[in-house]
Image: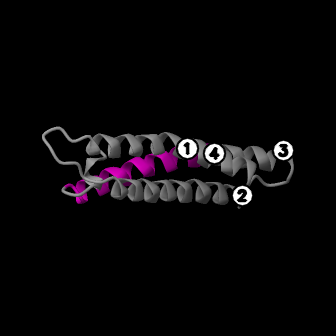
Amino acid sequence: MESTSAYIVSIVTALIFLLLAAIIANAIKFEGGSNPKDPQSRKTWFWILAILNPAVGFLSGYFVFKPDANMMVVNNYVNALSIGTVIGFVLYLLLGFILSKVFANGKIGHWF
């Protein structure tokens, strides 16, 4: 049961960070001219949040949602949390890539 909550924490964290990346991308205004800097800003924020996603997911899962039980249960939870963190990171990148290709002509399309 504890391992399921570890996976859920990681997936929800990834989805929240993806939503935050989309909000930031839409908040950055289009720049005119021959050499605009706004696409690079959107890409930079996407990758900053990609790096923060596993760190925040693991640390929040460890310090906030860690069960108070014997060592075997805690070790199983930390193992599941580690796997879930990797799954959340891959999910963030995969959904970010899909969204950038779906909205290729919009602000989100500058992520990749």
Question: How far across and how far down the image is residue 31, in percent?
Answer: 23, 48
Q: CA distance from mark 3 to mark 2?
A: 13 Å
Name the residue that disc number 2 marks: 2
Are the two marked residues, 4 and 3, in contact with CB atoms closer than 8 angstroms?
no
Are the two marked residues, 1 and 4, in contact with CB atoms closer than 8 angstroms?
yes
Q: Count the marks: how many?
A: 4
Give the number of the disc on residue 58: 4
Look at label 2 and name its amino acid. Glu
Mainly helix, strand or loop, the magenta region? helix
- Identify the residue at image location x=31%, y=46%: 111
Quadrant location, the N terminus: bottom right
Circle 2: element type: helix
Q: Nearer the viewer, mark 4 or mark 2?
A: 4
User: Closer to the N terminus: mark 4 or mark 2?
Assistant: 2
Question: How far across and how far down the image is residue 49, in percent?
Answer: 47, 45
Question: How far across and how far down the image is residue 39, in percent?
Answer: 27, 44
Q: CA distance from mark 1 to mark 4?
A: 6 Å
Look at label 4 and name its amino acid. Phe
* Label 4: few (<14), some (14–19) or many (≥20) C-alpha neighbours in 10 Å: many
Name the residue that disc number 1 marks: 54
Range shown magenta? 82-104
Quadrant location, the C terminus: top left
Give the number of the disc on residue 71: 3
- Measured along the vertical axis of the image, is residue 12 above or below residue 93? below
Q: Nearer the viewer, mark 1 or mark 2?
A: 1
Quarter of the view holding residue 19: bottom left
Residue with the most extreme right position? 70
- Identify the residue at image location x=21%, y=55%: 104
* Label 1: few (<14), some (14–19) or many (≥20) C-alpha neighbours in 10 Å: many
Look at label 1 and name its amino acid. Pro
Residue with the most extreme left position? 34
